[in-house]
Image (cartoon, grey):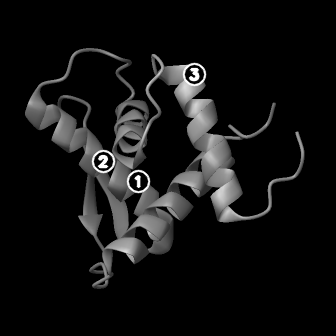
Amino acid sequence: MTKIINLKEKWNYLVTKLTDDFSEGEELNVDGILYLIGVQELGQGHREFKKDEKMNLMHISICKLLEPYGYYEFDFFDDDGWPHYKTITELPNLKPGEQTVLMKEAIVSYFEALEYFED
């Protein structure tokens, strides 16, 4: 694979690869990718989740993604195996576009650490 340099190229490549690997044709968006990360971090495999569990999966992924930035820290696993995080630093007030860039950057970093970009 050619070296991907900027965030936009990495993001587009990641969306295409994740869509091919995990979607049934519809391109994944940020929320869909956050859901996948939450399922991965929960570690219970793919199964049917209730609505509140899906929201918790999104929260898990956001905490995991923003942990390297110093916003959250892993705290403990509860009796059902769900990870819990504590807030270390409050998130700054970001404009919606800035939030999106931060999340995309964190998602790309997460998958780089998993060597998902390697073919």
Do callouts 1 and 2 mark residues in contact (Cβ within 8 Å)?
Answer: yes
For mark 1, give the secondary structure: helix
The residue under label 1 is which amino acid type?
Lys
Residue identified by numbered label 1:
64
Do callouts 1 and 3 mark residues in contact (Cβ within 8 Å)?
Answer: no
Query: In the displayed structure, would residue 36 be above or below residue 59?
Result: above
The residue under label 3 is which amino acid type?
Asp
Residue identified by numbered label 3:
21
69, 80: nearer the viewer:
69
96, 86: nearer the viewer:
96
Residue identified by numbered label 2:
60
Question: Most extreme residue toward the front, as rendered?
Answer: 26
Foreground disc of the pair 1, 3: 3
For the point 34% across and 33% down, the residue is 42
Residue 75 lies, in percent from the top left, at 29, 56
The residue under label 2 is which amino acid type?
Ile
Q: Mark 1 to mark 2: distance in Å?
A: 6 Å
For mark 3, give the secondary structure: helix
For the point 44% across and 57% down, the residue is 65
Q: Quadrant location of the C terminus? A: top right
